[in-house]
Amino acid sequence: MKVKNVLLFAAAALFSLQSCESDDPKGPDCNIPNADLSYNLNIKPIIDQQCTSCHAPGTGVVGAVGDFRNYSGLEPYLKNGKILDAVVNDKTMPQGGGMSQAQRDSINCWIASGYPQ
Ligand code: HEC
């Protein structure tokens, strides 16, 4: 019984290591304020990958508000809570899906710590 528990624990530990995605600097369970996350180091690459194909001038996507290519374009939507709602609470964005939970968690933690640059 004891040996079995140890094996189960080892398997669980291995699994959690594997499910830790490389695009998330703090691991998939990050849902607390995390002051180590910054826009330039951690968040901009996610936004560039997931949002700017629609949320930037010239994309032609009707209704895709703002210009998310830089911090100042993102800021109003951080302040009014729309990004938190769209990405973390309602998961309506990115439109069409394709964002990992780890990336959503990173954005959640970053906003919770006051979205530092
Ligand atoms: C495929 C195109 C597309 C992508 C990619 C996309 N969006 Fe959007 N987004 C839209 C469109 C279209 C709307 C307006 C219609 C709507 O609100 O559903 C919108 C609306 C929004 C709004 C405003 C919602 C409101 O209630 O006013 C926010 C905030 C937003 N998107 C954030 C994001 C973020 C953050 C990402 C990246 C994680 C993202 N979007 C990715 C197309 C996109």
Image: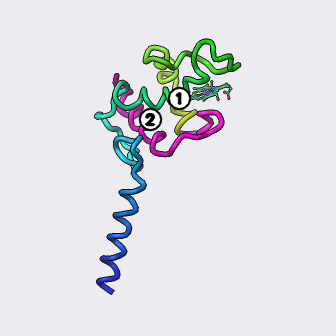
**Disc 1/disc 2 C-alpha distance (Å):** 9 Å
Near-viewer residue (2 or 31): 2
Q: Amino acid at mark 1?
A: Ile
Q: Amino acid at mark 2?
A: Ile
Ligand 1's quadrant = top right
Q: Is the CB–ligand 1 distance for label 1 below 8 Å?
A: yes
Q: Residue at x 38, y 27 (%)?
A: 115
Image-quadrant location for residue 23: top left
User: Left of 10 or right of it: where is 75?
Assistant: right
The segment highlighted magenta reads 89-117
Q: Residue at x 35, y 38 (%)?
A: 33
Label 1: which secondary element: helix
Q: Name the quarter where the C terminus is drawn.
A: top left
Circle 1 packing at 10 Å, graded few (<14), some (14-19), many (20+), is many
Where 65 sits versus 8, above or below? above
Label 2: which secondary element: helix
Q: Is the CB–ligand 1 distance for label 2 below 8 Å?
A: yes
Near-viewer residue (53 or 113): 53
Image-quadrant location for residue 13: bottom left
Circle nearer the N terminus (1, 2): 1
Mark 1 highlights which residue?
A: 83
Magenta run includes residue 43: no
The colour scheme is rainbow
User: Left of 96 or right of it: where is 51?
Assistant: left
- Rendering coords of residue 25 (x, y %): 35, 41
Magenta run includes residue 94: yes
- Rendering coords of residue 86 (x, y %): 58, 33
Mark 2 highlights which residue?
A: 107
Q: Are marks 1 and 2 in contact (CB under 8 Å)?
A: yes
Q: Which mark is residue 50?
A: none
